[in-house]
Image: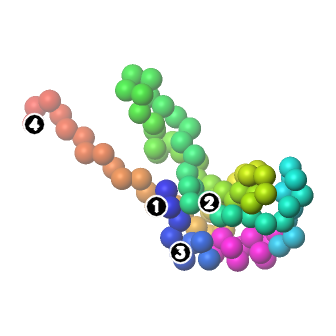
């Protein structure tokens, strides 16, 4: 899922206000990229091999520009609510 430009600005301000001097745990670098993907899928239906999108955990990821280390943050704490995934149309055999 892609973050909207307004949400990106909220994330950047939130991180600057609360984590302004944050350093990478792996290499010590202080420069980060904001990643667009903001939902982790945690379930899979073994019969259909499809993911449970409603079972995902939303998060905001940033990646160290030097080594690629990724940190995750809760978007709800930042005031961001991810978009709902598209609902699949359900049909019955009688239709």
Counting from the top left corner in percent of width and height, residue 49 is at 42, 28
Alpha carbon distance from label 3 to label 4: 42 Å
Residue 26 versus residue 78 in the image, above or below:
above
Are the residues at dot 3 and dot 1 in contact (C-beta closer than 8 Å)? no
Label 1, residues with CA under 10 Å away: few <14, some 14-19, many ≥20: few
Alpha carbon distance from label 4 to label 2: 42 Å
Looking at the image, tell me whether mark 2 or mark 3 is earlier in sequence order.
3
Looking at the image, tell me whether mark 4 or mark 2 is earlier in sequence order.
2
Q: Mark 1 points at which residue?
A: 83
Camera-nearest label, 3 or 4: 3
Viewer-proximal residue among 27 and 75 = 27
Q: Mark 3 points at which residue?
A: 5
Alpha carbon distance from label 1 to label 2: 16 Å
Numbered circle sitting on residue 35: 2
- What is the magenta segment's predominant secondary structure? helix
Residues rendered magenta in the picture: 10-19
Are the residues at dot 1 and dot 2 in contact (C-beta closer than 8 Å)? no
Looking at the image, tell me whether mark 3 or mark 4 is earlier in sequence order.
3
Q: Is residue 52 left or right of residue 18?
A: left
Q: Mark 4 points at which residue?
A: 95
Camera-nearest label, 3 or 1: 3
Q: Residue furthest right?
A: 28
Looking at the image, tell me whether mark 3 or mark 1 is earlier in sequence order.
3
Alpha carbon distance from label 3 to label 1: 14 Å
Q: Which residue is drawn at 74% across and 70% down?
A: 15
Label 3, residues with CA under 10 Å away: few <14, some 14-19, many ≥20: few
Looking at the image, tell me whether mark 1 or mark 2 is earlier in sequence order.
2
Alpha carbon distance from label 1 to label 4: 30 Å
Q: Quadrant of residue 35?
A: bottom right
């Amino acid at each position: 899922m892609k973050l909207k430009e307004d949400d990106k600005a909220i994330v950047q301000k939130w991180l600057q206000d609360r984590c302004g001097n944050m350093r990478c745990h792996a290499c010590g670098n202080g420069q980060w990229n904001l990643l667009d993907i903001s939902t982790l899928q945690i379930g899979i239906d073994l019969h259909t091999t499809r993911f449970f999108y409603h079972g995902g955990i939303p998060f905001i990821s940033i990646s160290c520009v030097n080594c690629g280390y990724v940190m995750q943050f809760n978007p709800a704490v930042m005031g961001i609510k991810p978009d709902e995934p598209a609902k699949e149309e359900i049909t019955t055999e009688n239709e």
